[in-house]
Image: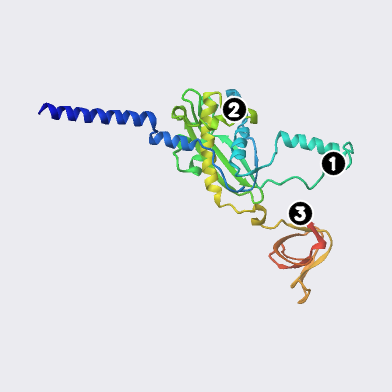
Amino acid sequence: MHLSIRVVLASTAGALLLASQAASAGGQTAQEQRAQKTAEIPNCSRSLGSLAVIEPQTNWWSPYQLSSPTSLIKVFVSKSHCFTLVDRGTGMAAMQAERDLAGSGELRGGSNLGKGQIKAADYVMIPDLVSQNADAGGNALGGLLGGLIGNRSVGALVGGLNIKKKTADVVLTVTDVRSSEQVAMTEGHATKTDLGWGAGGGVFSSGFGGAGATGYSNTEIGQVVTLAYLQAYTDLVAQLGGLPSSASAANVQQAVSMNRPGRLLKQSNGQGGAVRDLDPGMMLYPTGAKDGLMWEVEDELGNKGWVNSTLFDLAR
């Protein structure tokens, strides 16, 4: 081979090597890009409803110097604008104490504090840890959820929280408070290597400590748990994108209870006679159709007709 050809080939190889090194230094691999995307808090154009975040039954976080995962999830919810948060924890207890003062007459007149003001939660969310190992003081939850969640093997799910390997497997469940239907269940998985890809740089600057989510941004295991929950939350938002704009309107009407004797009429104007007599305490189920004070209802035997709404109260 001529010398000139060798020089050209060597120069070309060197240029390709330098270009490859520059791409590795200045760009991101596909794995890095996926990790970075996973670490971004999703953002919604509209609220999917009001949400209460409830603590799981087992306190698994205290031995790792972490706060309750509910604080972490509330940060995600607040920054994503995907739900309207309602407090059912410490804030609720403080609010109730203030209402007790109002009830005892201790507050100033015109405070406008009383019944009928608390916003209902459309959904409740429980952040939990799928755990079955010695490091986490595990339980049998992993085996139970393995068949429910899919998409990932049971072996991955039962990993739970492993301090030595810095891995976390978590689960988020969302339940409709009116129907009790479990509308979503998602799981998230993260490892120490995810931190190495630079994932979460923006997430961990979200002020977790100020929001009460202490330990999640300044410890390795806390950061791993954060990324696992964020993955689960991102998947959950994607699942719930088709929720109705009004959870209250989308659910069946609340049952009513007769407070006085009455009759179930065939038509709202009283024509056609009565279907049956109605006794106090009888439960009725509105269909949603109304004609002035007259509501269309069904009884527990499936009889349908109209009844005057002044004769019943909402069942509690």
Is 287 situated left or right of 72 in this image? right
Mark found first going from the N terminus, 2 or 1: 2
Q: Which residue is mark 1?
A: 111
Residue hosting label 3: 315
Residue 126, by quadrant, is top right
Locate the N terminus and report the quarter of the image it occupies.
Answer: top left
Mark 3 vs mark 1: give the one in front: 1
Reply above or below: 304 against 17.
below
Circle on res. 61: 2
Question: Nearer the observer, disc 2 or disc 3?
Answer: 2
- Residue 257, how many percent across, how many down? 78, 57
Residue 270 showing in the rendered view: yes
Amino acid type assigned to the residue bearing label 1 in the image: Ser
Q: Residue shown at 84%/61% (left/top)?
A: 260
| Residue 272 rendering spot, x and y as whole percentages | 76, 77
Q: CA distance from mark 3 to mark 1?
A: 29 Å
- Label 2 or label 3, whichever comes before in sequence order: 2
Residue toward you, 142 or 173:
173
